[in-house]
Image (tube, rainbow, N blue to C red):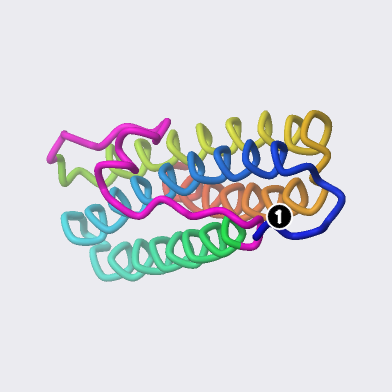
Amino acid sequence: MNPNIDVSDNNLKEVATRLNTLLADEYVFYSKTHKAHGSIKANNFNELHKFFEDQYENLRKIINDTAERVRALGHNEQGSLKEFLKAARLNEETDNSSDEHFIIQKLLEDHESVIRSIGKDINIIADDYEDLGTALFTTGIMEHHEKMALMLRSYLQ
């Protein structure tokens, strides 16, 4: 049963599809960040190990919140890795580098990619699909990614 929030059923379906794409990106990103946590080799290993753990825990919360938002719109969230990889705009990381600079740069690029994608989606969700609640929700996620990107950027300076 879809919620009665003055957003048409078709618009709710379209918004849920966009959120499921974001959810797929977040799962891929979570996996990449978790891999960074386990594979980093640097003089400041302990610091970076904890830093990446904090980052993937933030992503885990975003994943949970995004899945709940899809359900709040009356739709089902994706749940399999196969679905995530098919829908994600981010690519899996196939490089097994343990170089601190390389890993941080790749994660920063992914944050910036997600930020750009969300920025485009916000306008579509608000203007085309008339769902201001989800537009605000995705704005919050974008802000989380902006903060995480800022933290990564500080390691590259």
- Is 147 on the left-hand or right-hand side of 107? right
Seen as rendered, the residue at the extreme right is 6
Residue sitting at x 38%, y 62%: 56
Tell me the residue at 64%/62% (across/down): 72
Left or right: 151 in relation to 83: right
How many discs appear? 1
Magenta span: predominant SS is: loop
Q: Which residue is mark 1?
A: 137
The magenta-colored residue range is 72-96
Q: Does 95 lie within the magenta span?
A: yes
Q: Which of the two residues, 1 or 74, is positioned nearer the viewer here?
A: 1
Relative to 106, residue 145 above or below? below
Quarter of the rendering occupied by the N terminus: bottom right
Vertical placement of 3 versus 106: above or below? below
Choose top left, top right, bottom left or bottom right for residue 105.
top left
Which structural element holds mark 1? Answer: helix
